[in-house]
Amino acid sequence: MKTSYVHGYSPREAERLLDQAQTLTELLHCDTHYPNGSTVLEAGCGIGAQTITLAQNSPKAQITSIDFSPASLAQAEERVCAAGIQNVTFRQADIHALPFADNSFDHVFVCFVLEHLPEPARALASLHRVLRPGGSITVIEGDHGSAYFSPDSAAARRTIACLVKIQRQMGGDALIGRRCYPLLVNAGFEGVTISPRMVYVDASHPALVEGFTKQTFTAMVEGVRDAALGLGMISETDWDQGIADLYRTCEPDGTFCYTLFKGVGIKPKE
Ligand SMILES: C[S@@+](CC[C@H](N)C(=O)[O-])C[C@H]1O[C@@H](n2cnc3c(N)ncnc32)[C@H](O)[C@@H]1O
């Protein structure tokens, strides 16, 4: 099944995914370590931006990373090989039709994927099927409604709203972070815990100014410029003002906040 994907597969988007992963490595991965010999399914690995960290943090786990984009998988494989990582196998697959037996993985990891799916509950049901009883699922999602910044700007908020609306029109939900708990519980996972992870950026964290506010968040919003203008959602002047205002938060007196949601749940033992 082909699912539309709001951010597309351009070289700039690939670079953005890498910046995002590198900038957020510690915040998102610090508490994810899989035991030696365990099997892990990474669903929607993209170009392997998270795969490298997953594999390096759990060097003795066997990781299977799937995505439905062959081009992204090829990049992921190249990146993982270049890093000398040997505990990852790549496979093209749709999350909704996984080519794996029931109960075949000890753990499942899914990051920045559910937000793009029209039926995240169906995807979670599919992931639940391939997870063994007692195994864990880890889900990481953003929520663009959690973005606030100084100086505040109505124009900047409008550009973000355009991305949220376009993603919704494509069947996704850019506000899914706040829904991770009910989605996991309703999918049948138990002991679900959600830990919100705030990225707070000011001039005393130049790496975050560059890697998060500019290269991750603003680059992501800028990516829907043509679609937003083409759909008549916003005027070119207002768009340019909004983007300029997002960059304005990167000045020495600016600040930026965003919250990611990391959820973990367990498949009940029968
Ligand atoms: C935003 S990227 C995230 C990639 C990676 N997890 C990361 O954090 O860098 C979302 C990925 O999900 C993949 N994807 C979307 N729907 C999918 C589906 N139904 N089955 C498999 N992969 C899917 C896309 O091809 C894309 O590579």
Image (cartoon, rainbow, N blue to C red):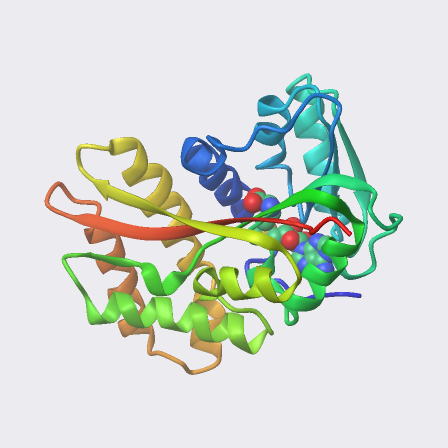
Q: Residue 135 is drawn in which quadrant? A: top right
Percent coordinates x, y for residue 119 in the rendering? 66, 70
Up-down relation of residue 159 to residue 244 (above or below): below
Which of 124 and 17 lies nearest the eye of the viewer?
A: 124
Report how many numbered discs are placed on residues in the image. 0
- Which residue is at a point 41% across and 51% down the rendered structure image? 260
Residue 170 location, x and y as percent?
A: 59, 73
The residue lying furthest to the bottom in this view is 232
The quarter of the rendered structure image containing the N terminus is bottom right
Identified at 43% across, 63% down, the residue is 178
In the picture as drawn, the residue positioned furthest to the front comes out as: 270
Q: In the displayed image of the protein, which residue is found farthest to the top?
A: 84
State left or right for residue 131 relative to residue 142.
right
Determine if residue 227 is in view.
yes
Q: Where is residue 49 in the image (x, y as percent from the top left)?
A: 58, 37
Observer-nearest residue: 179 or 87? 179
Snapshot quadrant of residue 8? bottom right
Residue 109 seen anywhere in this rendered image of the structure: no
| Foreground of the two, 244 or 135 | 135
> In the depicted view, which residue is nearer to us: 185 or 120?
185
Residue depicted at 19% across the width and 48% down the height: 255
Image vertical order of residue 138 relative to residue 185, above or below: above
Left or right, residue 195 beside residue 39: left
Quadrant of res 161: bottom left
